[in-house]
Amino acid sequence: MANVDIKPSGLVTSDLVDVLYMWWSSLKGICAKLDDDGGVTSTDYEANVITAILNGSISDTRGNNIINAVTAKADRFYIISPEGYTKEAILECFYDMLDAAETLAEQLDGDSLTFTNYEATAYTAICTQLVENQRGNVLGNGTAVHKFSPGGLWDEKEIVEFLYNAVEFIHLLTSDETTSGLDGDGTVTDTNYEALWYTANITRVIENSASSTIGNARLF
């Protein structure tokens, strides 16, 4: 395993913003690929998962940026970059991440694919923290008994755990796990979702509180 970049005992701004950018760019890439995949019926994944949900601007340390604004959430638009961010911005971003992940997994389950367990394996079993946004809405399944909320403490260990789970979502969603995952789904035409949007794009290694690691070797 490559050297660990992010651990429960240490999280720096550069790695945080890079992982958030990588996660959203991976999700956007997966959705665009699904929209173009000849074996997948629906062609509105990007519209439903990115355009309708992401409500912020996220920049990484190389100057890359992903931005989308949702009119209904204009008062909660957030900016995250190496130059800075607020705790409120991270909270809203985390909420959007869970919303987007669940929406994507649920749509896959209902899209007449071979597998119908995307939500169960990649979201429900993995996203084990709760996130409450500025409006009091809550997402996540809460089995880890931790809740991010407005005014809550900045718990670095839990933030690292959230990032680990988010990357694990991308991995399990895309990889061929024999009975789950896009690369192993017989209805999906393409078989390089993992290679493109997990292996090549998630280039940070994250260690969780159980000393498990996820992610890939740093490229920059």
Image (tube, rainbow, N blue to C red):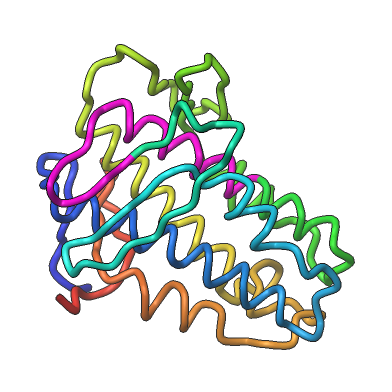
Foreground residue, 13 or 51?
51
x%, y% of residue 59? 27, 57
Please tell me in which quadrant of the rendered image residue 99 appears.
top right
Q: Is residue 62 above or below residue 138?
A: below
Considering the image in quadrants, where does the N terminus appear?
A: bottom left
Identity of the residue drawn at 44% across and 29% down:
76
Foreground residue, 105 or 161?
105
Give the residues drawn in magenta, as a range: 79-102
x%, y% of residue 94? 42, 38
Please indicate whether residue 65 sits to the left or right of residue 174 in the image: left
Please tell me in which quadrant of the rendered image residue 138 appears.
top right
Identity of the residue drawn at 11% across and 47% down:
12
Examine the structure image and report whether residue 165 is included in the region drawn in magenta: no
x%, y% of residue 181? 64, 69
How many marks the image carries: the answer is 0
Considering the image in quadrants, where does the C terminus appear?
A: bottom left
Q: Is residue 151 above or below residue 187?
A: above
| Main SS category, magenta section | helix
Foreground residue, 92 or 186?
92
Identity of the residue drawn at 21% across and 37% down:
85
Please indicate whether residue 37 sits to the left or right of residue 110 in the image: left
Please tell me in which quadrant of the rendered image residue 33 appears.
bottom right
